[in-house]
Structures are given as structure tokens and as C-alpha cells.
Image: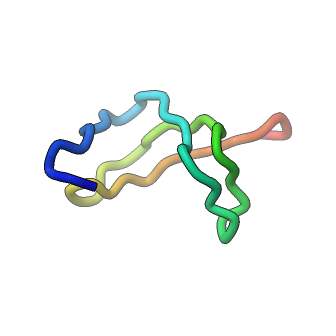
Amino acid sequence: MTSAARQFQVLDVVALKMDLSEHNLTAGQVGTPVEHLAPNIYEVDFSDDDG
């Protein structure tokens, strides 16, 4: 990411641009940042139809 990277806010709605197969996540999945850990590092909660 560049210094012009978007800064998310906690509880925004975000979507993945690429698959993260090591985490069983696919491009297009929608999640919510729940914690800002460091510059450009967020904990994001993803759920599916089963919760």
C-alpha cells in the first residue's frame, strides 16, 4: 500500500479485492473493521450465511 492508502474507520464496511485462501476468504467477501492495530493494519470481522 502507498502512503495514500485509504484509512478505514472501525465499523466501516469493506470488501476483499483478492482471495486470501490461507484464511478461507474470497474476493468480494464483505467485512467490518473492528479494531485498528497499527498504520494500515486492521482486525476485520468476516461472516458468511452461517454467521
Image quarter (top left, top right, bottom left or bottom right) of the N terminus: bottom left
Which of the pair 44/7 is nearer the observer? 7
Q: In x, y percent, where is residue 25?
A: 68, 54
Residue occupying the point 54% across, 44% down:
17
Q: With respect to residue 38, does 51 lie above or below?
A: above
Left or right relative to 43: residue 36 = left
Residue 7 is situated, as x and y percent measured from the top left of the image, at: 25, 39
Asked where in the image residue 38 lies, by quadrant, the reply is: bottom left
At horizontal 17% and vertical 43% (from top left) the residue drawn is: 4
Task: For the C terminus, give its image quadrant.
Answer: top right
Please, which residue is most extreme toward the left here? 3
User: Residue at the bottom extreme?
Assistant: 22
Residue furthest right as drawn:
50
Left or right of 46, for residue 42? left
Q: Does residue 11 appear left or right of residue 7 in this picture?
A: right
Q: Which image quadrant is residue 39 in?
A: bottom left
Report the label total. 0
Q: Is residue 11 left or right of residue 27?
A: left
Question: Residue drawn at (49%, 48%), measured in percent from left and top?
Answer: 44
Coloring basis for residues: rainbow
> Which is more toward the observer, 3 or 30?
3
- For the point 50% across and 37% down, which residue is it? 32
